[in-house]
Amino acid sequence: MRLEGIHHVTAVTGDVRRNVDFHTRVLGLRLVAKSVNQDDPLVYHVFYSDEVGNPGADLTFFEYRGAVRGRAGAGMVHRVIWRVASREALDFWEQRLNREGIARLRDGDTLHFADPEGLAHELVLDSSTDAPRIADHPQIPHEMALRGFDGVRAYVSDPAASGEFVERVMDATRREGDTWELRGDSRGRTITYDAAPAEPGRPGAGTVHHVAWGAPMAQHATWVDTLRGHRVGSTDVVDRHYFQSIYFREPGHVLFEIASDGPGFARDGTLEDLGRTLILPPWYEQDRARIEAALTPIPDPRADWGAGAGR
Ligand code: ZN
């Protein structure tokens, strides 16, 4: 049973407004949903993706307001890798980040930078034949835009053991060195395992919480059985409103999720309105006024685009 590459990556921010500004205005992603942590409605959960909220480009953040910066260590994803179309696109991003005063490092056909809270990003040339996952942005032509994830890198104590696990249990294919690809019918994404630094990780702002792999909803029950068959402790299927999820840890303790490719972000309204209103799980709906009053308002990132500014 093959997984459809990365579905989403979820990280932590201490400042949701700055986080929205960076990912929408600077990186050109679309805010496709704002919701709350299902276990704590005073914690924002924001989702960025391509224009229609497709899995494969979906970076999400929990806001723990004022959270201090964390540090990636063993058992944590430490870098998010995105595809771009060409060297010209790398030049474009080098210049764009420079104008924003963001430190960046060009290393041949890759570009490294970090978000305002230290989460590492890398842009690489798209060598796949996957459909690009692109969001509209008035200053970023489609041929320059981010095209979705290429993969993630994670720190583990034993890269070979983690690689063996994704190969044996999750049907990954070894690409080269410590990089494995999980590829299904519609897309593929990679995970690279790096030997963890000696210093232990510390969750906090700018660190990744988990990475989710995509699967058709119809396969979720089978995945629970498969994990059990391999003696991997997992949750049952959890309803996350936009998708159904199963959580477990791989041998290096990186938190994995298997998320369904549907129903997706448009289930609450039209594509045009994605990200505009706060989505609450049904059981919090009765407390909407109190919850909205307690959360930092997030301005509509597209409010000043004006008519026809999009592409
Ligand atoms: Zn998730």
Image (cartoon, grey):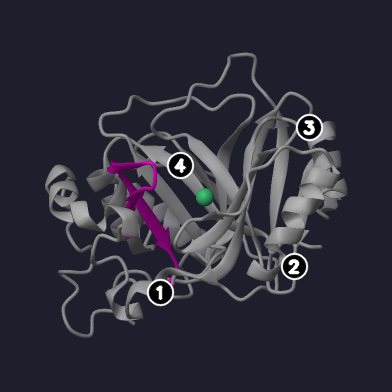
Q: CA distance from mark 3 to mark 2?
A: 23 Å
Q: Residue furthest bottom?
A: 308
Residue denoted by label 4: 11
Q: Main secondary structure of the magenta part?
A: strand
| First of labels 3, 2 by sequence position | 3
Q: CA distance from mark 1 to mark 4?
A: 23 Å
Residues packed near mark 2 inside 10 Å, few (<14), some (14 to 19) or many (20 plus): some
Element type at marker 3? helix
Question: Disc 3 residue type?
Answer: Pro
Q: Is residue 162 visible?
A: yes
* Foreground disc of the pair 4, 3: 4
Q: CA distance from mark 3 to mark 1?
A: 39 Å
Q: Which residue is at a point 79% across and 26% down the rendered structure image?
A: 158
Observer-nearest residue: 251 or 14? 251
Residue denoted by label 1: 267
Mark number, residue 184: 2
Question: Disc 1 residue type?
Answer: Arg
**Magenta-tinted stretch:** 34-52
Q: CA distance from mark 1 to mark 2?
A: 24 Å
Relative to 69, 298 lies left or right: left
Residue denoted by label 3: 159
Q: CA distance from mark 4 to mark 2?
A: 24 Å
Question: Is there a contact, CB below 8 Å, between mark 4 and mark 3?
Answer: no
